[in-house]
Amino acid sequence: MFMYLKKKGFWISLLAFPAFAAAGLLTWFDTPKRVGGPLLLSDTDSVSCSPCSLYARLVLAGDLMQHLSQVQAARKTGGEYDYTESFRFVTSVFQKADLAILNLETTLTPSLHYTGYPRFRSPSALADALSEMQIDVAVLANNHICDNGRTGIDYTTRCLDSLGIAFTGAFADSLQYNRFHPLRIDVNGIRMAIFNYTYSTNGLPVPKGIIVNLTDTSAIARDLSRVDRREIDCITVFFHWGDEYVRRPTPTQRMLAEYCYRRGVEIVVGSHPHVIQPIDLHADSDGIIRSVTLYSLGNLVSNQRDRYRNGGLIVTLDLEKTVGRPLRIRPSYTPVWVSLPDYRILTPSVVDTIALSDRERKEYLQFEQDTREWVAIEGLTEKCYDILPEADTNRNRDE
């Protein structure tokens, strides 16, 4: 028995999860979700592939933070919260993705008591904004996931679930853990397994019954060894790791990335430093990129204003699967920078079309220069999205 989730077309087999079917069937059917997109695979699912090449566009964003000033900026006159202005200029980037993923570095709360650093508690309207942007997956294993204890994790996962946004890394109970660890998704016939781990929960205890994936090489090795590569084409591991505000990866980051690649992982993505770190592209003897390490994508949006911390990268990985060959990856990037007071996330194609103060334009130009010089070292191509809100969202895979 399969169930159609009206998000971007997720399907999930209830045969593999009878307890979930009994407990959660009405919730899934009753919640409005969007149409189109990837498939959530159960352990019993098998997707057949034709001999031709298959393609999928994976779009990855950095840390989505919610300092209290961001929450206040989203508050409207009537007391409701609306994040439309913050995400207006990047929405079409995510809508162009076949699979869009970001690090949700806050917890949602059912109360009206919203807080910023050091204990993040944000309104559920933020999840609505993710849904409107067509974010497919939120990774939750980060050092702030326990900021609001059991309530935060339970409410955050239920909000995401109700909107058809998949998640992994933190789970309110064993049923969620069994459904979403690993997160198995079919994207245009390319079958993916997604894992997520964090180095810490800032010393806050993980509540009894709650599961948060902590970084442990034995656990990671065990998880990866259970992936059947006959059924999975691409393994992606998200780590919350490294040193904050340090622009180069630590030896531990490099060790963990190598640890994963030795076990067959194609894509490693990092968060937590809040600055852009180098990107490693691993090519075969023919120069074709087969695996990628994104040590840190910096901040998608936050209230951090210092140099290097006031923006980040959105990275696009165009994946190609051909029967009998390893996965081919074509990476590119888009710089993103945050403008106040509305916390608008801006890209190069937008900056020249809107008004900025002289100080903000100077700060943006510094960020743009820093980013392009830093990323150019890796030989990565900049993706020149036309992402004004009215832009045509059609795209050519060979662009």
Image (cartoon, rainbow, N blue to C red):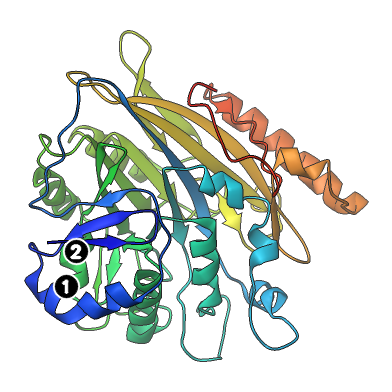
Quadrant of the rendered structure where residue 52 is?
top left
Estimate the spatial distance between the alpha carbons at disc 1 and disc 2, rounded to whole Å. 6 Å
Number of numbered discs present?
Answer: 2
Name the mark on residue 179: 2
Mark 2: secondary structure? helix
Q: Which one is in front, 363 or 35?
A: 35
Q: Amino acid at mark 2?
A: Arg
Find numbered disc 1 in the image and state the secondary structure of the residue it sits on: helix
- Whether residue 90 sits left or right of residue 225 in the image: it is right
Front residue of this view, candidates 32 and 312: 32
Which mark, by number, is residue 56? none
The answer to which image quadrant residue 224 occupies is top left
Q: In this figure, which residue is indicated by the disc labeled 1?
A: 175
Instruction: Verify CB contact (< 8 Å) between mark 1 and mark 2.
Output: yes
- Left or right: 293, with 18 as reference point: right
Please tell me whether residue 185 is drawn above or below residue 15 in the rendered image. Answer: above
Q: Amino acid at mark 1?
A: Leu
Label 1 neighbour load within 10 Å: few <14, some 14-19, many 20+: few
Residue at 77%, 40% (x, y): give it.
Answer: 366
Q: Measuring 26% from the left and 36% from the top, which residue is drawn there?
A: 189
Is 146 situated above or below 325? below
Quadrant of image for the C terminus: top right
Whether residue 303 can be seen here: no
On the image, which quarter does residue 235 sit in?
top left
